[in-house]
Image (spheres, helix red, strand yellow):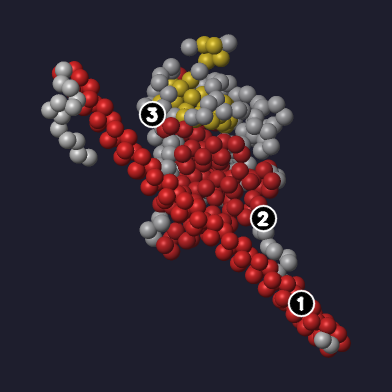
Amino acid sequence: MKTQSTQEYYVTSTSQSDSHRSSSAQSSIATDAVSSILPSQITFSGPAPSSSITVLSPTPQTIPGTQPGCVSGKVMAYPNISVDYITMSLSGILFSYNLNNLKSDPHEITELLRATSSEYGNWIVVGAFYRRKGLPHAAISVIQTMLQGLASSGSHQHLLNLFPLVMAQRQIPEEDLKPAYLLLCGCETDLAKKTRHDHPLSAVHQEKSIKWLRKVYGDFKSTSVPPLPSKVPTVECSTAPRASSTGGSTPSASHGHDQAMEQEIQSLRDNLNHQMSLLASLRASKRKLEDEFDAERSIRLKLEHQVDDFKRDRLRGIPWHAEMPYYRY
């Protein structure tokens, strides 16, 4: 399928004929590079369903202002296609990776990110995707690999040496790494919650979470606490001679203050007693009114019963004074 003279190639897990592969030398280098990292997953073929990687251009394309295979750490050269995809470049070949096919072991995607010299945002997106899937360990591994920039050992060493892999080489300022620190803090908090039954392990994760949080917001140490011990003896030394020089002025002042406080307390007590007496009087009046209300309601019910009886007798034609029983209430 062609769109604006650009043919899309899909990566599948089955081997295809060499005739479908790109003919350019740099495209072959990119194919061999990615295939050496993901040998069980990467082969180029015709328009077949995509499993993890979709090649966006069949010919090498150099990113403006950068070298082939290099992506600026400050500016996202290739924006994400969607939340579930990230875009990478290898030897000028653009391809997108489907994050829904991520394995629980992050080694594969970290090797691919390092080999493609992926920009800072791709690492953060992959780590956040792992955390969203409930795999905080994998997210921590991805972000720490990005921060440490450790080179792989073994058969891929010659390949990885071709690309700038260490994030420090891009001179990313510490301020721009705060999202990574916050992501690590959140992952450690998730692990602390999952291991709450194991108090020592949960405490370790909680301590790591605080460590990453401090790298973002810094340590807030109080500077007013240390001078306090030095101020206390100076105050004591200054007050001692004043007490001796003034003589009885200080006790008299304190005595007058105590008398004023006692008078205030006594006034409050008198006010409280007055309020309590008023409350008792109101309660007595309330009870009296309730009793009167009950008596009036009883009389009203009796009268209503008598009226009902008179109405029934009148309907039956019985005089109220004849054969009228004596009503007792």
Q: Residue under circle 3?
A: 13
- Give the SS element for disc 3: loop
Q: Which mark is residue 256?
A: 1
Q: Which mark is residue 218?
A: 2
* Left or right of residue 19: residue 295: left
- Give the SS element for disc 1: helix
* Left or right of residue 256: residue 168: left
Mark 2 crowd level (few <14, some 14–19, many ≥20, 10 Å Cα): few
Residue 102 x %, y %: 43, 36
Q: Disc 2 or 1, which lies upstream in sequence?
A: 2
Q: Disc 3 or 1, which lies upstream in sequence?
A: 3
- Tell me the kind of residue under disc 1: Gly
Q: Residue at x 61, y 39 (%)?
A: 120
Q: Residue at x 51, y 21 (%)?
A: 22
- Rounded to the nearest whole Å, what is the CA distance between mark 2 and mark 1? 51 Å
Check the image and report above or below for 217 versus 97: below
Is residue 104 visible in the rendered structure shown here?
yes
- Rounded to the nearest whole Å, what is the CA distance between mark 3 and mark 2? 47 Å
Quarter-of-image position of residue 226: bottom right
